[in-house]
Image (tube, rainbow, N blue to C red):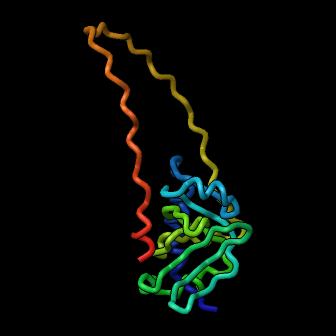
Amino acid sequence: MKTFPWLPGLLAPLAATCAHADSSAIYIAATETEELKAKDGQKVTVYGETSGAGKSSSGTNFVNFEGGEFYLVTFKTDLNLFPDGEPADLYDGKRLAVTGVMSIYQGKPQFKLTSPEQVRILEADEEFPPKQEEMKETPKPEAKPEAAPETEPKPEEEPKRKPPVDPSEYFK
């Protein structure tokens, strides 16, 4: 088994970042298939145990998660971005937290894995997802309404929606 003495130095800043978790981050267990499907096109962090990674004859890597249908896919064209080895070898049998844009392929939720920075290998005793700190509400001072000139009410505008992820970007 390879050891990487420099690895703790790289992971320390990452651990500090996770200790102050972004309150807007979305964390979903890999076993929550329906919840993952509902996040199609959104950036989320999926966490869980992996099992049964493999490679296709074309060189595509797959990393499956236990207890659900979620998996990671890395195409042969992206394997050069993983200098320490192929994802199927690196991440099989590990506890991971992976961040990416959720997509659905043949009815199953997946991430296209294009960079090792998307993946965090979790320690066996590490608590994940990080607990969200309770936000302390500070009372806002009440503003006195100013007399506004009478105008016609504006019709309510529909909120702008983000376009769905174009699958052609993921399946080249």
**Residue at the spot 32% in from the left edge and 16% down from the top edge:** 153
**Foreground: 144 or 109?**
109
How many discs appear? 0
**Residue at the spot 26% in from the left edge and 12% down from the top edge:** 151
**Foreground: 172 or 46?**
172
In the image, taking residue 85 as reference, residue 157 lies left or right, namely: left
**Residue at the spot 53% in from the left edge and 78% down from the top edge:** 7
In the image, taking residue 18 as reference, residue 145 lies left or right, namely: left
In the rendered image, the quadrant that contains the N terminus is bottom right
* Residue 43 seen in the figure: no
**Residue at the spot 53% in from the left edge and 60% down from the top edge:** 16
Q: Where 99 falls versus 84 (above or below)?
A: above
Q: Where 117 falls versus 148 (above or below)?
A: below
Name of the residue lying farthest toward the front: 106
In the image, taking residue 110 as reference, residue 125 lies left or right, namely: right
**Foreground: 2 or 63?**
63
Residue 172 placement (x, y as % from top left): 41, 77
* Residue 11 seen in the figure: yes
Residue 131 placement (x, y as % from top left): 64, 50
In the image, taking residue 75 as reference, residue 133 lies left or right, namely: right
Residue 106 placement (x, y as % from top left): 58, 69
Residue 108 placement (x, y as % from top left): 61, 66
* The image quarter in which residue 121 lies: bottom right
